[in-house]
Amino acid sequence: MELRRSIPLATRKKLGQFFTSSDLVQKVWASVLPTLAPTSVVADPACGAGNLLIPAADYLREQYGAFVAANQLRGHDVNGAFAHATRDRLSAIVGAELPRDAFSQSDFLLSSSLALRHASHVIMNPPYVMMDRPAGALWANRRVNAAAVFVVKALAEMTSGSRLIAILPDVLRSGSSYAGWRREVGNLSSHIEVVSLGAFDSHTDVDVFSLNAVAGSRSTTTQRPKPDQPWTAASALPFGTIGDAFKVRVGSVVPHRTPQTATRAPFLAARQVQPWATIDRVDGEAAVASRLDRGPFVVVRRTSSPRDGQRIRANLIADMRSIGVENHLIVLSPCAGGVAACQDLLANLRDPRTDQFMNERIRCRHLTVDAVKSIPWWSPRSEVGKYGPY
């Protein structure tokens, strides 16, 4: 795409702008195109090059003619040149000139009424850049992904029964810090469908998902994800989850933030561990002014990408001393069962089904405590009868 070549990747990342590939566009529209009627109005409030509007333009032209298609499409962008280029592009596809006032410069977060006016379908691939939390957004942390703000603003102002289709970064679907956002979207929607799409494209190391939501008040909601669950397909968990048997926490030590006058203690850094090895004694030592974890326990590297060979890389720490653990590691301490429980856990983490589960559960480049806690036990724990439930 010419726009991708003309705007450097570093610039697009800084602005949170990623131009949607045709393959991704087709996936997002596949189940939605049949819902378009002659009276449907399709709007993109961050239209960029207009890729997301092309399938709707083609469908409306083929089903209802060029006149209908030309008058049912809307595109706005904070960059007016993009909006005007989108109009010209769609006019050529439809074979009729689209209204000039339907494509203009507009900042959706400052004035959304123009972009949403009469829209029955709102399609968007909003910016992924971080921004300050908007006033009154109680669901958000102090800093929040702009894509999350776009979605909430759209659903809150769309006509009940209208449909939102969005391509969003996976952190909104699976990240712990966006649990409040997921609850808010559930409250604003009468129906939600979520599909993981994998990598955005071969040029962009960002995993994304599609959100297909029907705007509606909470009282009319007939289907939504449970607010405390990730937006993934439900799995049968006959043997429970890791969080039932282990206390899961991020390592507490951030070395460069620890005063060197703090008490020295055994210290485990991520660079010290080779995946799946058992460490009988932690050799490192450092100043530690935070929580110590007493062995035995299992550690899992936080850095993890769907493109890695394994999502989970773990070690059994059999050292029975109190140890400071670097915050690049996640600590899993058995509620009972000691080393035997940890060995059971390692076997469960190495099960191929764990990789499959994690690739569905979270596609961000860092694992979260909630994601690790939610990993299922794939079979009965072998030592339960020996040392009781844990």
Image (cartoon, rainbow, N blue to C red):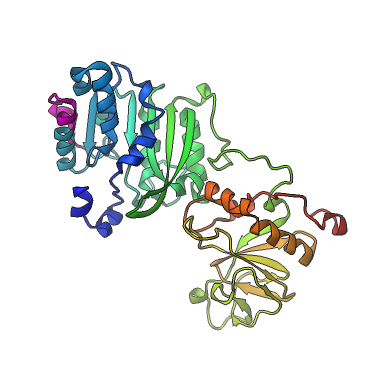
Query: Which image quadrant: the C terminus?
Result: bottom right
- Image side of residue 368 versus residue 100, left or right: right
Q: Is residue 230 visible?
A: yes
Q: Is residue 273 above or below residue 382?
A: below
Question: Who is closer to the viewer here, 279 or 248?
Answer: 279
* Quarter where residue 269 is shown: bottom right
- Image side of residue 228 versus residue 48, left or right: right
Residue 152 sits inside the magenta stretch: no
Q: Is residue 108 above or below residue 327?
A: above
> Which residue is located at x 53 percent, y 57 percent?
367
> Which residue is located at x 48 percent, y 51 percent?
363
Q: Position of residue 87 (x, y in %)?
A: 16, 33
Residue 97 sits inside the magenta stretch: yes
Q: Is residue 60 above or below residue 123?
A: above
> Which residue is located at x 38 percent, y 42 percent?
149
Q: Position of residue 250 (x, y in %)?
A: 59, 63
* Quarter where residue 265 is shown: bottom right
- Image side of residue 170 versus residue 353, left or right: left
Q: Is residue 163 above or below residue 184?
A: above
Question: Who is closer to the viewer here, 88 or 62?
Answer: 62
> Which residue is located at x 12 percent, y 25 percent?
97
Question: Who is closer to the viewer here, 212 or 356?
Answer: 356
- Image side of residue 81 versus residue 312, left or right: left
**Bounds of the magenta span?**
90-105
Q: Position of residue 305 (x, y in %)?
A: 48, 58
